[in-house]
Amino acid sequence: MKNVYDNEMFFNEYQTMRAVEINANNLIENPIMKSMLPDLNGKTILDLGCGDGNMETYFVKNGAKKVVALDLSENMIAEAKKINNHDNVEYYVMGMEDISSINQKFDIVYSSLAFHYIQDFNKLLNDIYNLLNQGGILIYSQESPLSTAPIFENDNYQSKIFIGNKRYNLLSDYCNQTERNNYWNGVPVTKYHRTYAGIVNALIKNKFNILEMQDSYASAEAIALCPKYAYQNDKPYFTFVKAEK
């Protein structure tokens, strides 16, 4: 299965976007994910959807013993090996659908903004559970269900409206837990919408103990750098989960 990040136009646009340091990943998503991590010293970590391997450098610098980092994109893995290569990090081109083939255990499974691309969420959680040591931790972020829910019939929709000086967001199809197809960087992208209840019940079904859930927020520093992030108070970009085996 060809990954969208192996579309050269998409990959180049994505790299250009991420090269601008003032972005939602750097100022909102990444700080919250790091705050949810346990002590990494001596830990074995599996990173699902590792991208360019930026977190692998963070894991190693904070004492991780071994990191296995996977991404379905050949472009991303090539980039990771080029800019975030370390002796105790192993990179593989592999989709999350195939992790049951991994023959080792981990203390932490980590994933940043990737789970909303997976159709069979129950299988993924079951596979992760089987790859974790007892007491192991799953930490992941995904696009907020408030963002993945709406289905618009054309690409010219306006998802935000103003009443007076207050901005509101359109919401539809929240309980319709099916795939969503739209365009990002000019390329068709498929995501899978799940409600908050759907997420929680899947974790419970797969025997996880939910330790923490968060919706994204912007710090005062982030808002000072990018004022539009104040709208996180109205609708968060991301949802975060920390769960234990």
Image (cartoon, helix red, strand yellow):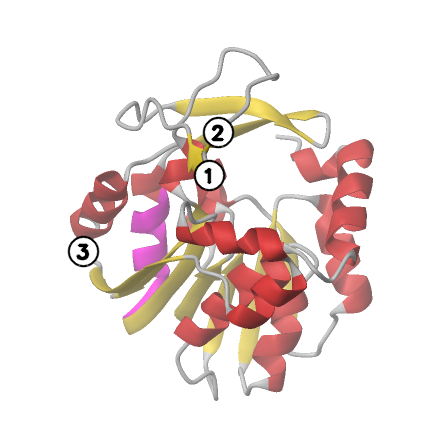
How far apart are the two marked residues, 3 and 1, measured between alpha carbons? 40 Å
Amino acid type of disc 2?
A: Ile
Answer with left or right where residue 160 lies relative to residue 245.
right
Circle 3 Cα neighbour tier, 10 Å, few/some/many (<14 / 14–19 / ≥20): some
Q: Going by the picture, which residue comes out furthest to the top? A: 153
Amino acid type of disc 3?
A: Lys
Which residue is at a point 81% across and 48% down the rendered structure image? 16
**Is label 1 in a helix, a strand or a loop?**
strand
Amino acid type of disc 1?
A: Arg
- Disc 2 target residue: 161
- Disc 1 target residue: 167
- Disc 3 target residue: 207
Q: Are marks 2 and 1 in contact (CB under 8 Å)?
A: yes
**Is label 2 in a helix, a strand or a loop?**
strand
Q: Earlier in the sequence, mark 3 or mark 1?
A: 1
Closer to viewer: mark 3 or mark 1: 1
Q: Are marks 3 and 2 in contact (CB under 8 Å)?
A: no
